[in-house]
Every structure is written in structure tokens, then in C-alpha cells.
Image (spheres, rainbow, N blue to C red):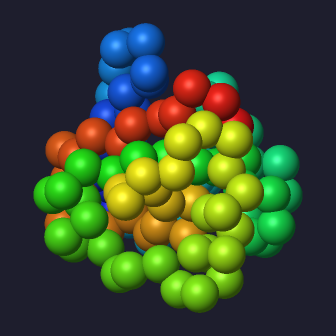
């Protein structure tokens, strides 16, 4: 069985959903599998839509690789305010180090 960790998704309104996340899946795939509607992911992870925008907390930023140039380019097109901790969730891979972390979803995608 695939190894899983717990992740929390917190919406702008303050609702928190706790889900099982498979290590190796992207955060976007985790959101879609768990009906987190705040992550739209129109392009299915092809890095051409920017509708999988999320905000990471510092503890998560510390344990995930930095965005590459293609992701940084696409982050310029996000619908909600882009922040220093903005990421496209299809490019963030769930790892054991993220256990118990909280992913924040933006107001709009
Ligand atoms: S799902 Fe389209 S850019 Fe992430």
C-alpha cells in the first residue's frame, strides 16, 4: 500500500479539511482526489492553467524544492494575489516531511 501522510487544506474562509495524502502524489492530485473544490486544476497538472494556486506555510517551504522557471512564469497569471509563498500545487510533490502541514487555498482560481 502506498505510504500516506496527513495534510490539511485551509480555505480563505477558515474551513479546514484533513485528508490522507499519498507520498509521491502532487498536492494538486491530493486536493482533487479529496474533493477540495478550491483547487481547480483545469489543465490536470500540465503547468498551463495556474488554477491550482495555493499558499504554503514556512514549514512547508522549508522542505519542498523551490519552483522552477516554468512554474514561476505561470505564477504570474494566478487569479488571487501572488505572494512569496505562492505555489502551483501540481508542482509540489507530497513527501514524508510534509506530514501534518497545512496548505492554504486562495480566494479565486
Ligand atoms: S493544474 Fe494547471 S498549472 Fe497546475
Residue at the image point whose x is 31% and y is 73% from the top: 64
Residue sitting nearer the eye, 79 or 89: 79
Q: Quadrant of residue 59?
A: bottom left
User: Is 106 positioned to the left or the right of 98 in the image?
Assistant: right
Q: Position of residue 40 (x, y in %)?
A: 72, 39
Figure quadrant of residue 36: top right
Q: Quadrant of residue 18?
A: top left
Left or right, 14 with respect to 109, comes to: left
Quarter of the image that includes the C terminus: top right
Image spot of residue 75 (x, y percent): 62, 63
Please identify the quadrant where the N terminus is shown: bottom left
User: As drawn, is 109 to the left or to the right of 48?
Assistant: left
Q: Residue at x 58, y 49 (%)?
A: 53
Name the residue at 34% across, 51% down.
Answer: 56
- The residue nearer to you, when weighing 104 against 44, is 104
Q: Is residue 22 visible?
A: no
Query: Which residue appears farthest toward the bottom when viewing the image?
Result: 69
Along the line of sight, the residue nearer the viewer: 34 or 85: 85
Q: Position of residue 27 (x, y in %)?
A: 49, 55
Q: Is residue 74 visible?
A: yes
Say which residue appears at 42% left-offset and 52% top-offset. Answer: 83
Judge by depth and name the residue closer to the eye, 107 or 64. 107
Q: Is residue 54 above or below residue 3?
A: above
The spot of residue 87 in percent (x, y) is: 49, 60
Amino acid at each position: 500500500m502506498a505510504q500516506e501522510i496527513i495534510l490539511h487544506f485551509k480555505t480563505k474562509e477558515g474551513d479546514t479539511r484533513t485528508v490522507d495524502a499519498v507520498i509521491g502524489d502532487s498536492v494538486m492530485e491530493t486536493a482533487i482526489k479529496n474533493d477540495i473544490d478550491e483547487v481547480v486544476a483545469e489543465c490536470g497538472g500540465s503547468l498551463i492553467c495556474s488554477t491550482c494556486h495555493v499558499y504554503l506555510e514556512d514549514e512547508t517551504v522549508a522542505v519542498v524544492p523551490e519552483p522552477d522557471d516554468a512554474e514561476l512564469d505561470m505564477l504570474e497569471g494566478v487569479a488571487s494575489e501572488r505572494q512569496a509563498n505562492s505555489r502551483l500545487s501540481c508542482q509540489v510533490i507530497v513527501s514524508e516531511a510534509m506530514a501534518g502541514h497545512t496548505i492554504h487555498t486562495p480566494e479565486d482560481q
